[in-house]
Amino acid sequence: MSSVMAKYMTIQKRKFKHGWKVAKQSRICYLFLLPYALLFTLFTVAPVCMSIYYSFTYYNVLEPARFIGLTNYINLILADDVFLISVKNTFLLAAITGPIGYIMSFLFAWFINELPRLLRAIMVLIFYAPTISGQVYMVWALLFSGDSYGYVNAWLMQFGIIDEPVLWLTDVKYMMGVIIIVVLWMSLGNGFLSFVAGLQGIDESQFEAGYVDGIKNRWQELWYITLPNMKPMLLFGAVMAITQSFGVADVTMVLCGFPSTDYAAETVVSHLIDYGQYRFDMGYASAIATVLFVVMILCNKAVHALLRKVGT
Amino acid sequence: MKKNMKKNRRKLLRKRKPNRSIGGDIGIYILLILFGAFFALPLVYSICTAFKPLDEIYIFPPKFYVKNPTMDNFADLFNIMGQSFVPFSRYIFNSVFMTAAGTFGNVIFCSMGAYVLSKYNFPGGKAFFAMVQTALMFSVYVTQIPNYLIMTKLGWIDTYLSIIIPAFATPMGLFLMKQFMEGIPDALIEAAKIDGAKEGRIFVRIVMPMVKPAWLTLIIFSVIAIWNNRAATFIYSEELKTLPYALQQLILGGVSRAGVGAAVTLFMMIVPIAIFLMCEGNVIETMASSGIKD
């Protein structure tokens, strides 16, 4: 037994020595990475680790955190009805706006790429503009306003489709529909822009080779040439789509009010903001964030597996 | 004139790729126009509103377009700005300075990290990148308190540093740069090494010019993020506050300030849109002229 142990130890030692040697050889790599790594650790990794620790404590920001084990998680699952509503809403939003937003981002970037240059720049601006100003989505509150001053109501009444104004943003029936439209309107964001830049970089000679090899239409070209070339950007866009669609909160809070009628538009992140910034229960908020974190990582893994199949 | 148009049309036709169907092209144009209208509508609305006199803002039934455009809202805005305790030029300076410094550092730090992560195989590199990607998934709302504690420890509360330095190392920036650098052929870097170029030189002379669309895109992301940052958590002193914060205070005046509010929304978009047009124009330009050959 001990000889096995000893052998294992020597192997490990050798592995470590080899690793150390390689690491020493790539000193320049660490030097390049060092500035980023330092700041990333300090301002991203450390806060995330602290938050995960807080999720096991009672922490009201004023007093020091008190360790309470899994209590936050148990309360979250067993005692918090609003959390269940928020999970349902977030999943609904993620399942609809995530994939649709992602596909829309790519398709529009691809369509725009065929336009003449000036037109292309204008179209990119129009589609990206909702992201440029962090606040413009507030105009939807005016468009969907619940009284007859709201544009949508006014138009629908003018055409005689409805008789009295619909409470778009306070009626439980319509809220989520409006939110989905607004989120989709904002979904041509960072992923979209990276697609535009990525499409510009594909080597023209590959397309020319494609014509010679008998690529018949634009869809074949898309699947066999464009998509395989775009894989790194597709991955980036997918992660952006996941973070955007799971992270919806500002839109619901501004449009439907906070809290919304019967919490019908509560999302996981707005629930988290409720506890973190209004009820001063950082421990509980951190537990919500950690659960969301795990779900998003799993979703990310699944999407990666799917993207590996592209262009094969 | 007519002849010119004909010539242009012929040029356009020649530019079409050989395997594109006309029907498909028309379909795409229709789709782009329809969706473009849907995406542009709220923006057109906010631009119109900024030029509406107050009675048109509250007219019934509501009108989308402005009838008697006026600069009153902007005049009011600049008027209120002039009365502020701290001169508004100071807020503008704060925002411009933080945005410029933060964006510059962000592009440099992320590109350097992304370069070695994408083009070299060294122990810990893959694990580090996986960590960066995972970090994007954690909600920023709960990390605010820990971040505040860290800032306090560093003594950076109420300084420019608290906004600028964290902006240098964004997970998204590194992720974006790394994805684009993966497309650079390894052979090119090998060849440069054989010619005796050191890593630093390869990075500046070969890698960065080749991923120009990527860092131009990163500049857009970074400018938008920092410019819209209200920075109310870390900064207390009135003379260090940012433009979005100061402008937000202005429009809290209620109904009578609705027009000014619309003007503010438009005013805040000037810088991001200018930067966007500059960068995006270049993204589209650069690659059309220079083909990367493997």
Image: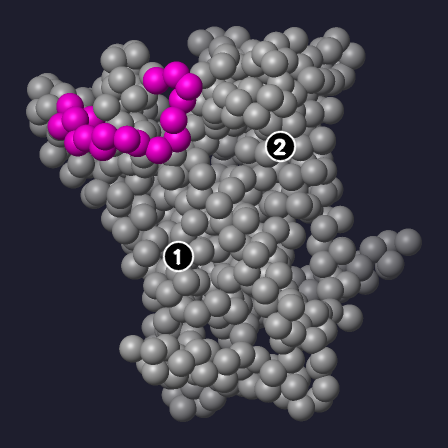
Q: Residue at x 50, y 80 (%)?
A: B13
Locate residue A113, reporting x and y percent. Answer: 51, 66
Residue B93 in sight from this viewpoint = yes
Residue B60's image quarter?
A: top left
- The residue type indicated by label 2 comes to Ile
Q: Residues within 10 Å of mark 2 (few under 14, many from 20)?
A: some
Q: Residue at x 57, y 35 (%)?
A: A183
Please report whichever mark, 2 or 1, sits nearer to the chain's N-terminal start.
Answer: 1
Foreground: A59 or B16? B16
Q: Which mark is residue A180?
A: 2
Locate residue A162, reporting x and y percent. Answer: 62, 18
To which chain does the residue with label 2 belong?
A
Residue B167's image quarter?
A: top left
User: How many numbered marks have been drawn onto this rendered protein structure?
Assistant: 2
Secondary structure of the residue carrying tag 1 is helix
**Which range is magenta?**
B59-76
Instruction: Locate the N terminus of chain B and report the quarter of the image it occupies.
Output: bottom left
Instruction: Locate the C terminus of chain B and report the quarter of the image it occupies.
Output: bottom right
Locate residue A214, reporting x and y percent. Answer: 72, 86
To which chain does the residue with label 1 belong?
A
Q: Residue at x 54, y 75 (%)?
A: A202
Chief SS of the magenta region: loop
> Is B73 within the magenta?
yes
Residue B242 in sight from this viewpoint = no
Q: Which residue is labeled 1 in the image?
A: A122
Looking at the image, residue B6 sits to the left or right of residue A163; the answer is left
Looking at the image, residue B235 sits to the left or right of residue A255; the answer is left
Asked if the residue at tag 1 contacts the one at tag 2, i.e. Cβ–Cβ closer than 8 Å, the answer is no
- The residue type indicated by label 1 comes to Ile
Foreground: B62 or A221? B62
Q: Is residue A30 above or below residue A179?
A: below
